[in-house]
Image: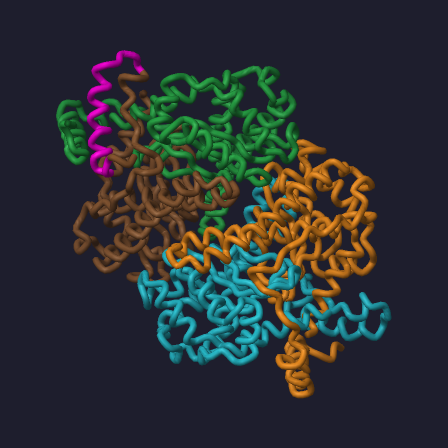
Chain colours: A brown, B green, C orange, D cyan
């Protein structure tokens, strides 16, 4: 798109949504908002939604390093890999299996960016679950305590390695479950993450060394349960669509 | 001249959400549907949504074997692993890393079941994309042809191995993208699959031997685009929540 | 009564090594053979060591397709990726994580080439284990039957997916064990493969569809046990170095 | 083996080797030492071969935590998983895919134990490569510097994630190459590791936070090149067998 700068291009896009909405009547065309470009949409880091100096048992140094280097690094890497994909797609001499090496990195960095944003997004709270979420976890897991037992056990089992523990609502099976992921490539299919725990060692080594379970306890003291509850409410609204 | 900058557009969106929050009765108390039990909900095989004897270039024998053995096998395995998890969670002598070995299987079988159902669900059609989906893919990928070029190339690159090619709507980044997966554990984070192509060799070896690209062409001739379009419409409605 | 404790035996061994070190002219200067270039050595396909029309229960069509497309494809891909690595190493603008995407492919194709050559190398025999190998497996696994039970069970468990079952001699732990691999990237560390079973679906789908266990039985009827025995003898000689 | 303690059992084993050597003449029986039991051989932690307080730029606290928690934890886990495999193999109700979940853990812990022992084994030196190893790396990589460039770049690319960088001698292809591994399951097929760099974050976070490249530089200052050279000499002797 030579004649536009990126900013101008996005401005035009938004305007087109509004205009299109007036012109056309059928369901799929009225309610379908204009889509952003897959290859050229730039990802930007989202600021921490809490004061990193005020968490309980997770140091400001750890959180800042995690946000800047690990999350921030993945945002940059995702943008880089997408630029390289644009060039690679036009390179007809590139074997498909090499193209896929880049697509693997694209999947991995997407996972890293999304899960990090959700992880930081569910931190900064009091650690006290509200009534709604307790009720939901009681229903899905037999009891809140049983849910917590499984979630923490999975965290403990990932100590010394890498991965995520995700409480997720599976939009296909309609189940609220805990999922084990051992890297950014992993994710439960068709699932909205509700509560996300980072178990890569950069989440805790600086503060806790190898004692991953102590970190998991600290994480629990800082869960922002209202955000978690909102995510679940959204998932349940989706089911009603 | 466009009336909004992108930043203003996003602000408007956020404002609308905030207003809506005041208007609605508290969702969590009135409309939150009861959740199904995570560990004890039994998964059942879903019948093929088309006549397996009538696909173009994919034999009835192949489709029946795929549905019965590979999909059906994963449904059974998912139920089995969930039963074992119930016992394992109560076994306090079981080390967390062994518990996680079962949770890994749980993630893998979940992926297999969900992606297989979506794969069979987007087969049985004419292979002719409708106007809505063409427009959406034009918008997201520059052109429908460019989308198809990437999707098929990724399929070709997975030949001889295992995995899935997934056109998915990422509910976190709001992007419609193609994703490479090399096994059932992989999935783009927070993503609703829109079009799913199985590249495990059981999807084609019986009919096509090692010529994976010929299988991908046959797959395209059988895509049920109306289902694909519905899935995308649902994803876009979710964004408006 | 046994003259040695295990500890004494190990001491003796170590002592012998130490003495040998004095006796020999410095190996590194006299006898260290010239090393081949890592990046530019071209890999060539090795012909099948048996007549593919004469296996019991594995069709010529299957074996030829497997050899030509899957093994042959990996040999070509390995050469391609090494050429790209040469260029990539000189490209200082290439981020290290993208360089590693190519190194991942390099590891994967190396695994595919090596395991395929070992797989075809241990086929073409009578399926009758000789006395030496029976004795070795009796020693390591309690009984030959127990070894076979585990090996076949692992094969069955990989049905419908991908991977290898490897009886390997671990040169670091000095154990002869069965190892599960679910893709070409996997391998037991520091291990000489002794018997290799390909469980990628291209190894059997064409002949057996989804019935992987029947394929495993056919594989056993064609094992070239003398080759397997030679590999083990080599591994054990290495231990004596 | 009820009447024997483990120690007695091993003593008998060693004695049998000696006796058998006298009794039997054929190559495979005379030179083949008795094999240790695959399932019941216990792994024991190996002490650090250097004073952990004396490395240059790697703190004693880091090294002790790494050795005790991450390496030591894997030794324990490997013994645990092998005990569970013994029980699992006799459990005919256990589906093969669940059996394989344990075999995957077995592979992973084997990789962790072996690579950690080799990693600590190539630390504690002056960081000054001797003439023999420089010559070998010159031959294989064009120049020592080119080898170092690739090895360090691979390390940098693994920062923030997990894995190993391995200079390995492939006993099947007869090549000395650098290999990328992103977890303990990975390994180049049929390869003797020569120099091993741990890139799991527990190797450096405590001292260096997210600056993985500074850790890699520190690692280089402590390489025990004589051990590396011995490993390569062994690999080359093997080729001559």
Secondary structure predominantly adopted by residues drawn in magenta: helix
The image shows a total of numbered marks equal to 0
The residue shown at (34%, 30%) is B140
Residue B118, image x and y in percent? 47, 26
The residue shown at (67%, 53%) is C44
Residue placed farthest to the front in the image? Answer: A3
- Closest to the observer, B160 or A54: B160
Image quadrant where residue B241 sits: top left
- Closest to the observer, D77 or A169: A169
- Vertical comparison of A225 with C33: above or below: above
Residue placed farthest to the bottom in the image? Answer: C22
Side (left or right) of C122 relative to C72: right
Side (left or right) of A160 relative to D190: left
The residue shown at (68%, 65%) is D36
Residue C241, image x and y in percent? 68, 74
- Vertical comparison of C231 with B120: above or below: below
Residue D141, image x and y in percent? 54, 66
Residue D128, image x and y in percent? 46, 79
Q: Is residue D213 magenta?
A: no
Can residue B86 be seen by looking at this rendering?
Answer: no
Side (left or right) of C187 relative to A180: right
Q: Is residue A26 magenta?
A: yes
Can residue C231 be seen by looking at this rendering?
Answer: yes
- Vertical comparison of B224 with D123: above or below: above
Residue placed farthest to the top in the image? Answer: A25
Magenta residues?
Answer: A4-27
């Amino acid at each position: 798109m030579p004649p536009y700068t990126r900013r101008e291009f996005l401005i035009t896009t938004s305007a087109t949504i509004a205009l299109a909405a007036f012109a056309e009547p059928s369901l799929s065309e009225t309610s379908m908002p204009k889509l952003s470009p897959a290859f050229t949409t730039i990802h930007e880091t989202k600021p921490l939604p809490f004061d990193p100096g005020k968490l309980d048992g997770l140091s400001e140094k750890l959180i800042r390093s995690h946000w800047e280097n690990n999350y921030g690094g993945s945002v940059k890497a995702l943008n880089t890999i997408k630029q390289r994909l644009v060039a690679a797609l036009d390179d007809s001499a590139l074997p498909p299996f090499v193209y896929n090496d880049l697509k693997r990195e694209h999947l991995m960095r997407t996972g890293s960016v999304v899960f990090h944003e959700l992880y930081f997004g569910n931190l900064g709270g009091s650690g006290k679950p509200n009534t709604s979420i307790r009720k939901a976890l009681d229903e899905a897991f037999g009891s809140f305590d049983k849910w917590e037992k499984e979630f923490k056990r999975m965290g403990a089992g990932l100590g010394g390695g890498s991965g995520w523990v995700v409480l997720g609502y599976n939009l296909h099976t309609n189940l609220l479950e805990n999922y084990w992921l051992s890297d950014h490539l992993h994710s439960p299919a068709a699932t909205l993450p509700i509560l996300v725990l980072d178990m890569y060692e950069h989440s805790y080594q600086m503060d806790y060394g190898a004692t991953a379970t102590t970190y998991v306890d600290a994480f629990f003291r800082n869960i922002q349960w209202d955000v978690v509850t909102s995510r679940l409410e959204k998932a349940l609204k989706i089911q009603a669509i």
